[in-house]
Image (cartoon, helix red, strand yellow):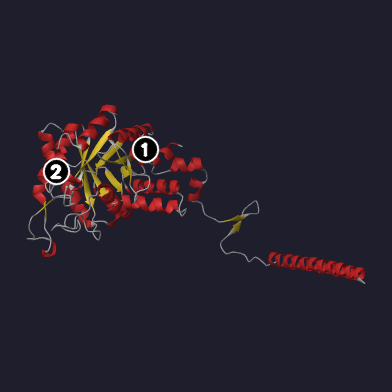
Amino acid sequence: GSTAGRRARRSDARCAAREVRMAAASAGDAAATAVAAAQKVEREAVHGLRVNEKGGIWVPQRARPRRNRKTSGMRDMCAENVVTPANLIYPLFVHTKADNEPIPSMPGCERHSVESVLREVAQAHALGVRNVIPFPKIPEELKTNSADECYNPNGLVPRVISAIKDKFPDMLVWTDVALDPYSDQGHDGMVSSDTVRGDDGKFARVMNDETVEQLCRQAVCQARAGADVVAPSDMMDGRVGAIRDALDAHGFTDVSIVSYTAKYASAYYGPFRDALDSAPRETSLAPRNKKTYQMNPANSREALIEAQLDIAEGADMLMVKPGLPYLDIVKLLADASHLPIAAYHVSGEYAMMKAAAERGWIDERDTVLETLLCFKRAGASAILTYYAKQAAQWMNE
Protein backbone atom coordinates (compact mmCIF):
# COMPACT_ATOMS: atom_id res chain seq x y z
CA GLY A 1 0.00 0.00 0.00
CA SER A 2 2.83 2.41 0.83
CA THR A 3 4.63 1.71 -2.48
CA ALA A 4 1.47 2.44 -4.43
CA GLY A 5 1.08 5.69 -2.50
CA ARG A 6 4.59 6.82 -3.37
CA ARG A 7 3.99 6.04 -7.03
CA ALA A 8 0.79 8.06 -6.98
CA ARG A 9 2.53 11.04 -5.45
CA ARG A 10 5.34 10.95 -8.06
CA SER A 11 2.75 10.79 -10.79
CA ASP A 12 0.91 13.78 -9.35
CA ALA A 13 4.19 15.76 -9.17
CA ARG A 14 4.97 14.96 -12.82
CA CYS A 15 1.53 16.09 -13.83
CA ALA A 16 1.89 19.33 -11.92
CA ALA A 17 5.29 20.06 -13.54
CA ARG A 18 3.82 19.32 -16.98
CA GLU A 19 0.97 21.74 -16.31
CA VAL A 20 3.44 24.45 -15.28
CA ARG A 21 5.43 23.97 -18.51
CA MET A 22 2.27 24.08 -20.57
CA ALA A 23 1.14 27.29 -18.83
CA ALA A 24 4.53 28.92 -19.46
CA ALA A 25 4.42 27.90 -23.12
CA SER A 26 0.91 29.27 -23.41
CA ALA A 27 2.03 32.58 -21.87
CA GLY A 28 4.97 32.70 -24.27
CA ASP A 29 2.66 32.09 -27.21
CA ALA A 30 0.40 34.88 -26.01
CA ALA A 31 3.34 37.28 -25.71
CA ALA A 32 4.56 36.36 -29.17
CA THR A 33 1.08 36.88 -30.53
CA ALA A 34 0.93 40.34 -28.92
CA VAL A 35 4.30 41.30 -30.43
CA ALA A 36 3.18 40.12 -33.83
CA ALA A 37 -0.02 42.11 -33.51
CA ALA A 38 1.93 45.21 -32.57
CA GLN A 39 4.19 44.75 -35.56
CA LYS A 40 1.16 44.64 -37.81
CA VAL A 41 -0.01 48.10 -36.67
CA GLU A 42 -0.25 50.14 -39.82
CA ARG A 43 2.18 53.08 -40.02
CA GLU A 44 0.48 56.13 -41.37
CA ALA A 45 2.36 58.41 -43.71
CA VAL A 46 3.85 61.45 -41.95
CA HIS A 47 3.05 64.68 -43.79
CA GLY A 48 6.12 66.60 -44.98
CA LEU A 49 8.57 63.68 -44.92
CA ARG A 50 9.90 62.13 -48.08
CA VAL A 51 11.70 59.00 -49.18
CA ASN A 52 15.26 59.39 -50.42
CA GLU A 53 16.82 57.56 -53.36
CA LYS A 54 17.88 54.72 -51.06
CA GLY A 55 14.36 54.19 -49.82
CA GLY A 56 14.97 55.75 -46.40
CA ILE A 57 13.07 58.50 -44.62
CA TRP A 58 14.24 61.99 -45.53
CA VAL A 59 13.50 65.20 -43.61
CA PRO A 60 13.92 67.85 -46.34
CA GLN A 61 16.19 70.25 -44.40
CA ARG A 62 19.50 71.44 -45.80
CA ALA A 63 20.87 73.03 -42.61
CA ARG A 64 21.59 70.37 -39.99
CA PRO A 65 23.44 71.73 -36.92
CA ARG A 66 24.04 68.18 -35.71
CA ARG A 67 26.64 67.73 -38.47
CA ASN A 68 28.97 69.95 -36.41
CA ARG A 69 28.45 67.67 -33.41
CA LYS A 70 28.79 64.27 -35.09
CA THR A 71 32.24 63.28 -33.75
CA SER A 72 34.48 64.30 -30.87
CA GLY A 73 36.97 65.77 -33.34
CA MET A 74 34.28 67.89 -34.96
CA ARG A 75 32.94 69.02 -31.57
CA ASP A 76 36.40 70.01 -30.38
CA MET A 77 37.09 71.93 -33.57
CA CYS A 78 33.83 73.87 -33.35
CA ALA A 79 33.98 74.60 -29.60
CA GLU A 80 33.42 78.30 -28.99
CA ASN A 81 34.96 78.23 -25.52
CA VAL A 82 37.71 76.17 -23.92
CA VAL A 83 38.87 76.28 -20.30
CA THR A 84 42.52 75.50 -19.55
CA PRO A 85 44.51 75.50 -16.29
CA ALA A 86 45.78 78.95 -17.29
CA ASN A 87 42.28 80.33 -16.68
CA LEU A 88 42.21 79.15 -13.07
CA ILE A 89 43.14 80.90 -9.83
CA TYR A 90 43.88 78.57 -6.91
CA PRO A 91 42.75 79.83 -3.47
CA LEU A 92 44.57 78.44 -0.45
CA PHE A 93 43.69 78.92 3.20
CA VAL A 94 46.76 79.46 5.36
CA HIS A 95 47.28 79.72 9.11
CA THR A 96 50.17 80.20 11.51
CA LYS A 97 50.16 76.62 12.83
CA ALA A 98 52.67 73.95 11.86
CA ASP A 99 50.05 71.34 10.97
CA ASN A 100 47.17 71.45 8.52
CA GLU A 101 43.57 71.52 9.70
CA PRO A 102 40.65 70.17 7.65
CA ILE A 103 37.66 72.43 7.01
CA PRO A 104 34.53 70.31 7.65
CA SER A 105 32.22 72.43 5.50
CA MET A 106 34.66 72.33 2.57
CA PRO A 107 35.73 68.70 2.03
CA GLY A 108 39.12 68.51 0.37
CA CYS A 109 40.19 71.96 1.60
CA GLU A 110 42.46 72.64 4.55
CA ARG A 111 44.03 75.46 6.50
CA HIS A 112 47.63 75.04 5.38
CA SER A 113 50.91 75.73 7.04
CA VAL A 114 53.31 77.86 5.01
CA GLU A 115 55.28 74.75 4.03
CA SER A 116 52.11 73.00 2.95
CA VAL A 117 51.14 76.01 0.82
CA LEU A 118 54.43 75.66 -1.04
CA ARG A 119 53.73 71.98 -1.71
CA GLU A 120 50.26 72.81 -3.03
CA VAL A 121 51.65 75.57 -5.23
CA ALA A 122 54.27 73.17 -6.62
CA GLN A 123 51.59 70.64 -7.56
CA ALA A 124 49.33 73.28 -9.12
CA HIS A 125 52.27 74.81 -10.99
CA ALA A 126 53.17 71.42 -12.47
CA LEU A 127 49.59 71.09 -13.76
CA GLY A 128 49.68 74.46 -15.52
CA VAL A 129 47.93 76.61 -12.91
CA ARG A 130 49.76 79.94 -12.82
CA ASN A 131 47.67 81.97 -10.38
CA VAL A 132 47.30 81.49 -6.63
CA ILE A 133 45.68 83.54 -3.87
CA PRO A 134 46.25 82.97 -0.13
CA PHE A 135 43.46 83.65 2.37
CA PRO A 136 44.73 83.93 5.97
CA LYS A 137 43.23 82.75 9.24
CA ILE A 138 44.61 85.27 11.69
CA PRO A 139 44.96 84.45 15.42
CA GLU A 140 42.27 86.13 17.54
CA GLU A 141 44.79 88.00 19.67
CA LEU A 142 45.97 89.91 16.58
CA LYS A 143 42.51 91.08 15.54
CA THR A 144 41.36 94.66 16.16
CA ASN A 145 38.70 96.98 14.81
CA SER A 146 41.32 98.94 12.87
CA ALA A 147 42.86 95.67 11.59
CA ASP A 148 46.41 97.04 11.77
CA GLU A 149 47.81 93.52 11.42
CA CYS A 150 46.79 93.61 7.76
CA TYR A 151 49.84 95.72 6.88
CA ASN A 152 52.38 94.12 9.22
CA PRO A 153 55.39 93.45 6.93
CA ASN A 154 56.24 90.40 9.04
CA GLY A 155 52.67 89.14 9.05
CA LEU A 156 51.36 85.87 7.69
CA VAL A 157 50.36 87.00 4.19
CA PRO A 158 53.60 88.89 3.39
CA ARG A 159 55.58 85.83 4.51
CA VAL A 160 53.50 83.53 2.31
CA ILE A 161 53.83 85.84 -0.70
CA SER A 162 57.61 86.04 -0.32
CA ALA A 163 57.93 82.28 0.12
CA ILE A 164 55.93 81.56 -3.03
CA LYS A 165 57.74 84.13 -5.16
CA ASP A 166 61.14 82.94 -3.95
CA LYS A 167 60.43 79.36 -5.01
CA PHE A 168 58.12 79.97 -7.99
CA PRO A 169 58.98 83.35 -9.51
CA ASP A 170 56.70 82.75 -12.52
CA MET A 171 53.65 82.03 -10.33
CA LEU A 172 51.31 85.03 -10.19
CA VAL A 173 50.41 85.72 -6.57
CA TRP A 174 47.09 87.45 -5.99
CA THR A 175 46.10 88.89 -2.62
CA ASP A 176 42.81 89.67 -0.96
CA VAL A 177 42.53 93.31 0.14
CA ALA A 178 39.95 93.55 2.92
CA LEU A 179 39.94 93.88 6.68
CA ASP A 180 37.64 91.03 7.71
CA PRO A 181 40.33 88.38 8.42
CA TYR A 182 42.02 90.90 10.74
CA SER A 183 38.88 92.45 12.26
CA ASP A 184 37.55 91.66 15.72
CA GLN A 185 34.16 92.76 14.36
CA GLY A 186 34.13 90.35 11.42
CA HIS A 187 33.65 93.08 8.84
CA ASP A 188 35.49 94.15 5.72
CA GLY A 189 35.86 97.63 7.17
CA MET A 190 36.24 99.52 10.42
CA VAL A 191 33.12 99.74 12.56
CA SER A 192 31.97 102.98 14.19
CA SER A 193 31.55 103.27 17.96
CA ASP A 194 28.00 104.64 17.69
CA THR A 195 24.77 103.87 15.87
CA VAL A 196 24.26 107.29 14.29
CA ARG A 197 23.07 106.70 10.71
CA GLY A 198 23.55 102.99 11.25
CA ASP A 199 21.36 100.34 9.64
CA ASP A 200 17.84 100.56 11.14
CA GLY A 201 19.26 102.90 13.79
CA LYS A 202 20.29 99.87 15.85
CA PHE A 203 23.73 99.03 14.54
CA ALA A 204 27.03 100.77 14.05
CA ARG A 205 28.26 101.87 10.61
CA VAL A 206 31.00 100.27 8.58
CA MET A 207 33.08 103.39 7.94
CA ASN A 208 34.04 103.92 4.33
CA ASP A 209 36.87 106.43 4.08
CA GLU A 210 38.67 105.34 7.25
CA THR A 211 38.60 101.80 5.88
CA VAL A 212 39.99 102.86 2.50
CA GLU A 213 43.00 104.36 4.25
CA GLN A 214 43.76 100.99 5.86
CA LEU A 215 43.21 99.16 2.58
CA CYS A 216 45.81 101.34 0.88
CA ARG A 217 48.36 100.44 3.58
CA GLN A 218 47.45 96.76 3.19
CA ALA A 219 47.84 96.80 -0.61
CA VAL A 220 51.23 98.54 -0.47
CA CYS A 221 52.45 96.05 2.14
CA GLN A 222 51.40 93.14 -0.08
CA ALA A 223 53.07 94.71 -3.12
CA ARG A 224 56.31 95.13 -1.17
CA ALA A 225 56.21 91.43 -0.33
CA GLY A 226 55.99 90.58 -4.03
CA ALA A 227 52.26 90.41 -4.86
CA ASP A 228 51.55 90.58 -8.59
CA VAL A 229 47.82 91.30 -8.24
CA VAL A 230 45.90 92.95 -5.42
CA ALA A 231 42.18 92.23 -5.31
CA PRO A 232 40.10 94.55 -3.09
CA SER A 233 37.03 92.57 -2.01
CA ASP A 234 35.76 95.06 0.58
CA MET A 235 33.22 96.96 -1.57
CA MET A 236 34.08 100.36 -0.09
CA ASP A 237 33.36 103.31 -2.37
CA GLY A 238 36.44 104.84 -4.01
CA ARG A 239 38.89 102.21 -2.88
CA VAL A 240 40.14 101.22 -6.35
CA GLY A 241 41.30 104.74 -7.20
CA ALA A 242 42.86 105.24 -3.77
CA ILE A 243 44.73 101.92 -3.95
CA ARG A 244 45.90 102.68 -7.49
CA ASP A 245 47.30 106.03 -6.36
CA ALA A 246 48.96 104.49 -3.31
CA LEU A 247 50.60 101.73 -5.35
CA ASP A 248 51.79 104.15 -8.02
CA ALA A 249 53.16 106.59 -5.45
CA HIS A 250 55.30 103.78 -4.00
CA GLY A 251 56.60 102.70 -7.41
CA PHE A 252 54.31 99.68 -7.91
CA THR A 253 52.84 100.76 -11.23
CA ASP A 254 53.06 97.19 -12.55
CA VAL A 255 50.98 95.67 -9.74
CA SER A 256 47.52 94.88 -11.11
CA ILE A 257 44.20 95.62 -9.44
CA VAL A 258 41.40 93.09 -9.84
CA SER A 259 38.39 94.73 -8.29
CA TYR A 260 35.58 92.76 -6.73
CA THR A 261 33.24 94.97 -8.72
CA ALA A 262 29.99 93.11 -8.14
CA LYS A 263 30.28 91.35 -4.80
CA TYR A 264 26.84 90.47 -3.54
CA ALA A 265 25.61 90.08 0.03
CA SER A 266 25.15 86.37 -0.54
CA ALA A 267 24.27 83.35 1.56
CA TYR A 268 26.82 81.31 -0.42
CA TYR A 269 29.82 82.49 1.64
CA GLY A 270 29.16 80.43 4.78
CA PRO A 271 31.90 77.78 4.42
CA PHE A 272 34.52 80.46 3.61
CA ARG A 273 33.69 82.32 6.81
CA ASP A 274 33.99 79.04 8.70
CA ALA A 275 37.46 78.58 7.23
CA LEU A 276 38.69 82.01 8.33
CA ASP A 277 36.38 82.68 11.30
CA SER A 278 35.52 85.97 9.60
CA ALA A 279 31.75 86.17 10.02
CA PRO A 280 30.23 89.35 11.55
CA ARG A 281 30.31 89.22 15.34
CA GLU A 282 27.09 89.30 17.33
CA THR A 283 28.65 90.54 20.57
CA SER A 284 28.96 94.22 19.66
CA LEU A 285 27.17 97.00 17.83
CA ALA A 286 28.56 95.73 14.53
CA PRO A 287 25.96 95.02 11.82
CA ARG A 288 24.90 91.38 11.78
CA ASN A 289 25.45 91.15 8.03
CA LYS A 290 27.31 92.96 5.24
CA LYS A 291 24.33 94.36 3.36
CA THR A 292 25.27 98.02 3.83
CA TYR A 293 28.29 97.64 1.56
CA GLN A 294 27.90 94.43 -0.46
CA MET A 295 25.37 94.48 -3.28
CA ASN A 296 21.72 93.50 -3.09
CA PRO A 297 21.13 90.13 -4.85
CA ALA A 298 17.97 91.67 -6.35
CA ASN A 299 19.97 94.14 -8.45
CA SER A 300 21.78 93.79 -11.76
CA ARG A 301 21.93 97.30 -13.27
CA GLU A 302 23.68 98.49 -10.12
CA ALA A 303 26.62 96.31 -11.18
CA LEU A 304 27.06 98.58 -14.21
CA ILE A 305 27.45 101.60 -11.91
CA GLU A 306 30.11 99.78 -9.89
CA ALA A 307 31.87 98.71 -13.09
CA GLN A 308 31.93 102.21 -14.52
CA LEU A 309 33.44 103.58 -11.32
CA ASP A 310 36.07 100.84 -11.03
CA ILE A 311 37.12 101.25 -14.65
CA ALA A 312 37.44 105.02 -14.23
CA GLU A 313 39.50 104.50 -11.06
CA GLY A 314 42.02 102.24 -12.77
CA ALA A 315 40.91 98.64 -12.29
CA ASP A 316 42.63 96.14 -14.60
CA MET A 317 40.03 93.39 -14.26
CA LEU A 318 36.49 93.17 -12.85
CA MET A 319 35.33 90.30 -10.65
CA VAL A 320 31.84 88.95 -9.96
CA LYS A 321 31.13 87.10 -6.72
CA PRO A 322 29.40 84.63 -6.27
CA GLY A 323 29.75 82.92 -9.61
CA LEU A 324 27.17 80.32 -10.64
CA PRO A 325 24.01 82.11 -9.40
CA TYR A 326 25.29 85.32 -11.00
CA LEU A 327 26.24 84.25 -14.52
CA ASP A 328 23.90 86.94 -15.79
CA ILE A 329 26.10 89.54 -14.08
CA VAL A 330 29.24 88.00 -15.57
CA LYS A 331 27.64 88.30 -19.02
CA LEU A 332 26.39 91.83 -18.27
CA LEU A 333 29.84 93.12 -17.35
CA ALA A 334 31.54 91.22 -20.18
CA ASP A 335 29.23 92.90 -22.68
CA ALA A 336 29.56 96.34 -21.09
CA SER A 337 33.34 96.44 -20.62
CA HIS A 338 36.48 95.78 -22.62
CA LEU A 339 38.33 94.73 -19.44
CA PRO A 340 38.80 91.04 -18.62
CA ILE A 341 36.16 89.57 -16.30
CA ALA A 342 36.83 87.21 -13.39
CA ALA A 343 34.29 85.00 -11.65
CA TYR A 344 34.56 83.58 -8.14
CA HIS A 345 33.26 80.02 -7.80
CA VAL A 346 32.58 80.48 -4.09
CA SER A 347 32.71 78.16 -1.11
CA GLY A 348 28.97 77.49 -0.95
CA GLU A 349 28.90 76.42 -4.59
CA TYR A 350 31.92 74.19 -3.98
CA ALA A 351 30.39 72.66 -0.83
CA MET A 352 27.11 71.83 -2.60
CA MET A 353 28.94 70.06 -5.42
CA LYS A 354 31.06 68.12 -2.95
CA ALA A 355 28.01 67.06 -0.94
CA ALA A 356 26.12 65.89 -4.04
CA ALA A 357 29.18 64.04 -5.35
CA GLU A 358 29.76 62.29 -2.02
CA ARG A 359 26.18 60.99 -2.18
CA GLY A 360 26.57 59.80 -5.74
CA TRP A 361 23.96 62.25 -7.02
CA ILE A 362 26.25 63.86 -9.61
CA ASP A 363 29.38 62.95 -11.51
CA GLU A 364 31.84 65.31 -9.83
CA ARG A 365 34.37 65.50 -12.65
CA ASP A 366 31.86 66.19 -15.41
CA THR A 367 29.84 68.63 -13.31
CA VAL A 368 32.88 70.66 -12.28
CA LEU A 369 34.30 70.89 -15.78
CA GLU A 370 30.89 71.89 -17.16
CA THR A 371 30.56 74.55 -14.47
CA LEU A 372 33.94 76.06 -15.31
CA LEU A 373 33.02 76.05 -18.99
CA CYS A 374 29.81 77.93 -18.14
CA PHE A 375 31.86 80.67 -16.48
CA LYS A 376 33.99 80.95 -19.60
CA ARG A 377 30.96 80.95 -21.89
CA ALA A 378 29.35 83.73 -19.87
CA GLY A 379 32.45 85.89 -20.41
CA ALA A 380 34.91 85.15 -17.60
CA SER A 381 38.59 84.96 -18.55
CA ALA A 382 39.70 84.14 -15.00
CA ILE A 383 37.96 81.70 -12.65
CA LEU A 384 38.76 81.59 -8.96
CA THR A 385 37.81 78.11 -7.78
CA TYR A 386 38.66 75.72 -4.96
CA TYR A 387 38.61 73.01 -7.62
CA ALA A 388 41.56 74.62 -9.47
CA LYS A 389 44.12 71.89 -8.83
CA GLN A 390 41.69 69.00 -9.24
CA ALA A 391 40.18 70.54 -12.38
CA ALA A 392 43.65 71.04 -13.87
CA GLN A 393 44.36 67.35 -13.28
CA TRP A 394 41.17 66.40 -15.09
CA MET A 395 41.96 68.78 -17.95
CA ASN A 396 45.40 67.19 -18.35
CA GLU A 397 44.07 63.62 -18.53
Q: Residue at x 33, y 47 (%)?
A: 103
Taking the spot 24% from the left edge, 34% from the top edge, the residue there is: 160
Q: Nearer the viewer, residue 174 or 140?
A: 140
- Residue sitting nearer the eye, 99 or 153: 99
Residue neighbourhood size for the residue with mark 1, other residues' Cα within 10 Å, grouped as few (<14), some (14–19), many (≥20):
many
Q: Is residue 172 above or below residue 379?
A: above
Q: Position of residue 231 (x, y in %)?
A: 21, 42
Q: Amino acid at mark 2?
A: Leu
- Disc number lying in front (1 or 2): 2
Q: Is residue 243 visible?
A: no
Q: Residue furthest front?
A: 2
From the image, tell me which residue sits under label 2: 215
- Measuring 36% from the left and 51% from the top, which residue is drawn there? 351
Does residue 36 lie above or below 389 as drawn? Answer: below
Q: Is residue 287 above or below residue 147?
A: below
Q: Which residue is mark 1?
A: 85
Locate residue 142: give its quadrant.
Answer: top left
